[in-house]
Image: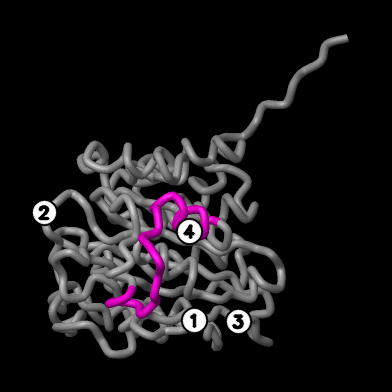
């Protein structure tokens, strides 16, 4: 999948038409959409094409339990066009976006929903708004993030990886801890794979990191304490704490730009946001969220050149 051309104007028109709609008017599903049911899916594919000769697969895996459902709602109402515009204007070519949605397999009716990789505004939006914002979760401190990671690792096939040995990007939002392993019984009932035993979380993360740059985005500092430690044990510096959930798309786009070398440092990111006339306080929050990871790439701030005296 992933054919067709992206239009920022078409995307902006699409999301702006929802200004006065309720969440239930935008997200109409009351159960898992048949086309988003992961059971029996072989592969979700990101392919090169004449329109997109260097396809770059990007997965948004969004927690839809409790208050986390506010993030897909924000993407559908205003933020997703900014993600695409930031990528394209920074020089990241041919992005193809796939949406996943997670709940808790121990309690929810739809703990995993999976779309397709798409390149056009209309197709991305269709999968996003086909999601069921179940709003469940079990209050046990964990959600089934591992199932989305497992699916991405074993049930996606990308030309970026197979032709160019290039990793895509996997952005997961959440505010709870992961389960310590991917349970074989849940994989069998929800995806259809027969596993000999449960798969430890670290193994799932290792498999995912072989084909994607995996990031876990915590929506705001108030939720940091409940899950940061557990996620850093498996993803290290790829755990990003946002200042506010509204920054999800901007931070994700900036992470791609930094990793791809399209943005030299966070200062370049900040200047780009200034051009978009984003509020200065919000720009500062985005820079704060990006800086620890950017430092690992030596892309946090411009480096001073050494001065040599005769």
Quick one: SS at disc 2? loop
Q: CA distance from mark 2 to mark 3?
A: 39 Å
Q: Which mark is nearer the camera, 4 or 3?
A: 3
Mark 1 near mark 4, Cβ–Cβ under 8 Å? no
Sequence-wise, the earlier of marks 1 and 2 is 1
Q: Position of residue 92 (x, y in %)?
A: 60, 64
Give me the C-alpha separation between circle 4 and circle 3: 21 Å
Q: Residues within 10 Å of mark 2 (few under 14, many from 20)?
A: few
| Residue under the image location 52 percent in, 86 percent down | 1
Q: Find numbered disc 3 in the image and state the secondary structure of the residue it sits on.
A: loop
- Using residue 95 as the reference point, say whether residue 69 is left or right of it: left
Q: For label 3, count other residues whose C-alpha is less than 10 Å away and answer few (under 14), some (14-19) or many (20+).
A: many
The residue that disc 1 covers is 43
Closer to the observer: label 2 or label 3?
Answer: 2
Residue at 21% in and 75% down:
110
Q: Which residue matches tag 2? A: 139
Which label's residue is closer to the chain start, 1 or 4?
1
Residue assigned mark 4 = 253
Q: Are marks 1 and 2 in contact (CB under 8 Å)?
A: no
Q: Residue furthest top?
A: 310
Could you give the CA–CA distance between mark 1 and mark 2, rounded to whole angstroms?
32 Å
Is residue 208 on the magenta stretch?
Answer: yes
């Amino acid at each position: 999948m992933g054919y067709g051309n992206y239009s920022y104007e078409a995307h902006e028109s699409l999301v702006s038409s929802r200004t006065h709609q309720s969440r239930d008017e935008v997200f109409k599903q009351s159960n898992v959409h048949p086309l988003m049911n992961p059971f029996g899916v072989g592969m979700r594919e990101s392919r090169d094409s004449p329109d997109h000769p260097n396809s770059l697969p990007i997965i948004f895996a969004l927690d839809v339990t409790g208050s986390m459902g506010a993030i897909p709602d924000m993407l559908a109402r205003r933020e997703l066009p900014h993600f695409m515009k930031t990528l394209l204007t920074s020089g990241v070519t041919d992005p193809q976006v796939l949406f996943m949605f997670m709940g808790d397999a121990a309690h929810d009716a739809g703990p995993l929903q999976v779309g397709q990789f798409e390149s056009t505004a209309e197709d991305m939006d269709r999968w996003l708004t086909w999601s069921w914002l179940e709003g469940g979760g079990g209050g046990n401190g964990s959600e089934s993030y591992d199932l989305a990671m497992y699916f991405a690792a074993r049930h996606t096939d990308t030309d970026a990886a197979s032709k160019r040995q290039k990793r895509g990007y996997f952005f997961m939002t959440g505010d709870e801890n992961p389960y310590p392993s991917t349970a074989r019984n849940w994989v069998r009932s929800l995806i259809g794979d027969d596993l000999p035993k449960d798969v430890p979380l670290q193994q799932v993360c290792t498999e995912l990191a072989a084909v994607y740059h995996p990031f876990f985005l915590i929506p705001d500092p108030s939720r940091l304490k409940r899950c940061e430690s557990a996620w850093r044990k498996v993803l290290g510096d790829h755990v990003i704490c946002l200042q506010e959930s509204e920054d999800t798309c901007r931070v994700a786009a900036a992470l791609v730009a930094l990793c791809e070398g399209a943005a030299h440092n966070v200062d370049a990111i900040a200047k780009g946001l200034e051009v978009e006339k984003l509020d200065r306080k919000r720009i500062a929050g985005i820079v704060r969220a990006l800086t620890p990871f950017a430092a690992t790439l030596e892309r946090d701030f411009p480096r001073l050149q050494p001065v040599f005296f005769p």
